[in-house]
């Protein structure tokens, strides 16, 4: 008696998705999730709103402001303007970076992604690349809008123009900073794989560690503070290096990029070794 056999499937008929398809898949995920849209809208509103608020208050209280604080604003009005907007709005990118990957673990969607791409790591690289590109484009746009609002409000108190030395680099640097911050948050989310824990970890790095490092005595505290991720990274959004800054803008951004690269490498190792 003979038995019918099913011919083996030809691998060529079901090719693994290429990297281009992975990029398209990740773009579809990001743009179709409502929380992404609302978080990015919140970034724009908070950044422009706090820029107008802090710069407006500073100008209104200019004559009553401490001379040292006024001198600091005059020395680098671009850094003051961009820093006013990023102070709290950057938290939206911290949250979104974690959500982009941690939410897939909480919903189980990550299993479907990894079944389609058994090698796993291309999924992480595609997700990182698409998310960074989205944040970079929006971040640069928000930085320019924030700069123009702030420079109009600050008026003759501290005149500044895009043609001034270092200003254009700083404004574009605002977008570069947000993009790297998004990757940093995504890496922590991939390591922790838990939304609340990942968000807590990122906010701890951004808002908590810096003040604690400043409490350390002498040059030890100064160096630890200078080489923390966000403290080093935000220097790229300053037109001029401050007197107390240990790093130049590009050196600071390089330190931030190194932190991010190390965390992404850890996330990649864990992604290969752990079950989804």
Image: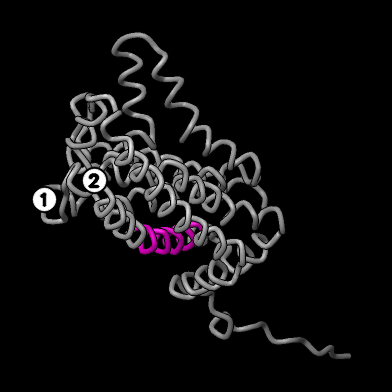
Check if residue 172 falls in the magenta segment.
no
Q: Residue at x 31, y 50 (%)?
A: 174
**Occupied quadrant, residue 226:** top left
Mark 2, other Cα within 10 Å: few <14 / some 14–19 / many ≥20: many
Can residue 247 be seen by looking at this rendering? yes
**Is residue 268 visible to us here?**
no
Choose between 76 and 128: the one closer to the eye.
76
- Residue 78 — which label? 2
Q: Position of residue 240 (x, y in %)?
A: 17, 39
Q: Position of residue 9 (x, y in %)?
A: 64, 83
Return the residue nearer the eye: 139 or 276.
139
Q: Main secondary structure of the magenta part?
A: helix
Provide residue 13's location: percent of width, then percent of height: 57, 85
Q: Magenta stretch: give its range.
A: 124-139
Colouring mode (rainbow / by chain / secondary structure / one colour): one colour
Question: At 36% across and 22% down in the image, what residue appears?
Answer: 224
Q: Which residue is mark 1?
A: 164
Task: Estimate the x, y position of residue 1 in percent, counting from the top left.
Answer: 89, 90
Whole-Å distance between the Cαs marked 1 and 2? 10 Å
Residue sitting at x 81%, y 90%: 4
Which class describes the residues within 10 Å of circle 1: few (<14), some (14-19), or many (20+)?
Answer: few
Tag 2 or tag 1, which sits nearer the N-term?
A: 2
Q: Which residue reaches farthest top?
A: 217
Most foreground residue, 58 or 9: 58
Dot 2: element = helix
Asked if marks 1 and 2 touch (Cβ < 8 Å), the reply is yes
Residue 229, quarter of the rendered image: top left
Residues 169 and 81: in front is: 81
Across the whole image, how many numbered discs are drawn on residues?
2
């Amino acid at each position: 008696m003979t038995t019918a056999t099913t011919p083996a499937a030809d691998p060529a008929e079901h090719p693994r998705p290429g990297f281009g398809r992975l990029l398209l898949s990740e773009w579809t995920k990001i743009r179709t999730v409502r929380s992404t849209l609302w978080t990015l809208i919140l970034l724009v509103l908070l950044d422009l709103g706090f820029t107008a608020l802090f710069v407006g208050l500073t100008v209104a209280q200019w004559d009553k402001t401490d001379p040292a604080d006024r001198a600091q604003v005059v020395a680098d009005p671009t850094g003051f303007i961009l820093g006013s907007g990023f102070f709290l709005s950057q938290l939206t990118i911290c949250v979104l970076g974690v959500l982009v990957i941690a939410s897939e673990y909480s919903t189980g969607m990550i299993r479907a992604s990894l079944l389609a791409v058994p090698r796993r790591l291309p999924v992480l690289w595609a997700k990182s690349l698409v998310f960074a590109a989205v944040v970079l484009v929006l971040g640069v746009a928000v930085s320019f809008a924030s700069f123009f609002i702030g420079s109009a409000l600050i008026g003759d108190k501290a005149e500044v123009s895009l043609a001034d030395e270092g200003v254009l680099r700083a404004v574009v640097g605002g977008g570069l900073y947000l993009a790297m911050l998004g990757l940093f948050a995504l890496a922590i989310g991939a390591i922790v794989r838990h939304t609340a824990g990942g968000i807590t970890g990122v906010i701890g790095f951004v808002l908590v560690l810096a003040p604690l490092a400043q409490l350390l005595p002498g040059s030890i505290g100064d160096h630890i503070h200078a080489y923390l991720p966000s403290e080093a990274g935000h220097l790229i959004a300053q037109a001029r290096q401050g007197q107390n800054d240990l790093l130049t803008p590009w050196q600071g951004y390089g330190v931030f990029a190194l932190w991010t690269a190390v965390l992404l490498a850890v996330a990649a190792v864990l992604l290969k070794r752990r079950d989804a």
